[in-house]
Image (cartoon, helix red, strand yellow):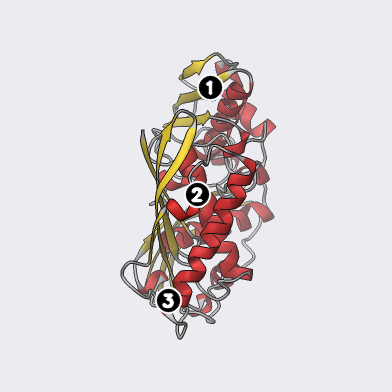
């Protein structure tokens, strides 16, 4: 079976918009745990547009330019490469209200369908192997751009994986990487360095999991096929929150509920529900299922879900419907459980494996 998946680095303009939106949401939560927030961000060139609404019981403290700059510099948008996050011209239509947020954040305030999935085992973080690999290579490239052999390159980039899964073997056939290059660096040495980072990350996976059976030298590599990519980030593409849902969830093989995971307060049912459904799916696999897909439907103002449908290969344990009530999820989870990025390297993040 041929499998594809893709992951994007944090400097991709869509993911940078997600990062800024979440930085605003998390700042609201920092000053008021029950804060309500719905934030949208878009970028193009040196322009940034922020809209939505935030309600906190005490006044919002940090100015938006400070939040944007800190978010950008956390991933390397500090002017050393192409973009300096402090130079964005910010156009804000964000409504900042000082009022009790509980009428929104303590209730299911939207209708939605939640999807939670898990399969395989802990060696691939209970993710589809192709998506796990895309995330692992993305993480390796970004880490190298921040503190390794690729220091100063990035942070914009994408990784695409093509593999053949047969007889419990993950036979990687093709890797495509497009990565932002620092101005002035020679192209061919840069491409070679990217290949070295990919090889090192892949060999580490092989050492812990023999299912990655193909030698790295047999994998077809395509690195920056359009040549040097220097004018990247929002100078090369526009960005918008919520446009990388497939990459944020499980890759293209697994169906989604559709709710964005960024730009919403931690109690929003799209977000806390996705976390809980992922946890429950992982628990089902750990208790005996080979694969588990949960779908949960919610209605506005109703605490308990309308329905829960589970599809399993094998047999595992899935909680009953009341376990997924909004009030239950709020009692069991907290902001730190929800405001985290999906990654291959930490089994405790986004809807990963903490139970």
| Residue at the bottom extreme, as displayed | 184
Q: Earlier in the sequence, mark 3 or mark 2?
A: 3
Q: Earlier in the sequence, mark 1 or mark 3?
A: 3
For disc 1, the neighbor class at 10 Å (few under 14, some 14 to 19, many from 20) is some
Badge 1 vs badge 3, beta-carbon distance below 8 Å? no
For disc 3, the neighbor class at 10 Å (few under 14, some 14 to 19, many from 20) is few
Dot in front, 1 or 3: 3
Q: Position of residue 322 (x, y in %)?
A: 58, 18
Residues 266 and 233: in front is 233
Dot in front, 2 or 1: 2
Mark 2: secondary structure: loop
Residue 215's disc number? 2
Q: Position of residue 54 (x, y in %)?
A: 53, 54
According to the picture, the residue beneath numbered tag 3 turns out to be 188
Residue 290's disc number? 1
| Residue at the left extreme, as displayed | 226
Q: CA distance from mark 3 to mark 2?
A: 23 Å
Q: Position of residue 279 (x, y in %)?
A: 60, 31
Mark 3: secondary structure: helix
């Amino acid at each position: 079976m041929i499998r594809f998946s893709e992951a994007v680095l944090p400097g991709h303009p869509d993911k940078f918009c997600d990062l800024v939106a979440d930085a605003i949401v998390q700042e609201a939560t920092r000053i008021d745990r029950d804060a309500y927030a719905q934030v949208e961000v878009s970028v193009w060139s040196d322009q940034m547009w922020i809209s939505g609404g935030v309600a906190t019981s005490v006044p919002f403290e940090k100015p938006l330019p400070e939040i944007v700059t800190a978010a950008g510099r956390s991933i390397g948008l500090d002017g050393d490469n192409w973009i300096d996050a402090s130079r964005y011209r910010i156009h804000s239509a964000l409504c900042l209200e000082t009022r009790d947020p509980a009428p929104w954040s303590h209730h299911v305030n939207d209708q939605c369908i939640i999807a939670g999935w898990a399969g395989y085992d802990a060696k691939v973080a209970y993710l589809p192997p192709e998506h796990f690999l895309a995330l692992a290579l993305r993480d390796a490239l970004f880490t190298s751009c921040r503190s390794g052999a690729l220091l100063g390159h990035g942070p914009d980039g994408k990784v695409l994986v093509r593999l053949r899964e047969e007889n419990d073997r993950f036979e990687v056939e093709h890797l495509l990487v497009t990565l932002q290059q620092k101005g002035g660096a020679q192209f061919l040495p840069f491409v070679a360095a990217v290949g070295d980072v990919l090889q090192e990350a892949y060999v580490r996976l092989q050492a812990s999991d023999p299912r990655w059976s193909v030698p790295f030298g047999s994998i077809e590599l395509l690195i920056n096929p359009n040549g040097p990519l220097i004018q990247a980030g929002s100078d090369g593409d526009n960005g918008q929150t919520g446009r990388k849902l497939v990459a944020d969830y499980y890759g293209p093989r697994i169906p989604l509920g559709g709710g964005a995971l960024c730009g919403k307060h931690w109690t929003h049912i799209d977000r806390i529900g996705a976390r809980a459904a992922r946890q429950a799916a992982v628990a089902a696999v750990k208790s005996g299922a080979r694969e588990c897909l949960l779908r949960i439907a919610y209605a506005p103002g109703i605490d308990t879900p309308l329905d829960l449908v589970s599809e399993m290969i094998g047999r595992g344990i899935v909680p009953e419907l009341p376990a997924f009530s909004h009030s239950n999820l709020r009692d069991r989870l907290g902001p730190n459980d929800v405001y985290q990025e999906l990654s291959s390297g930490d089994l405790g993040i986004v809807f990963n494996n903490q139970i």
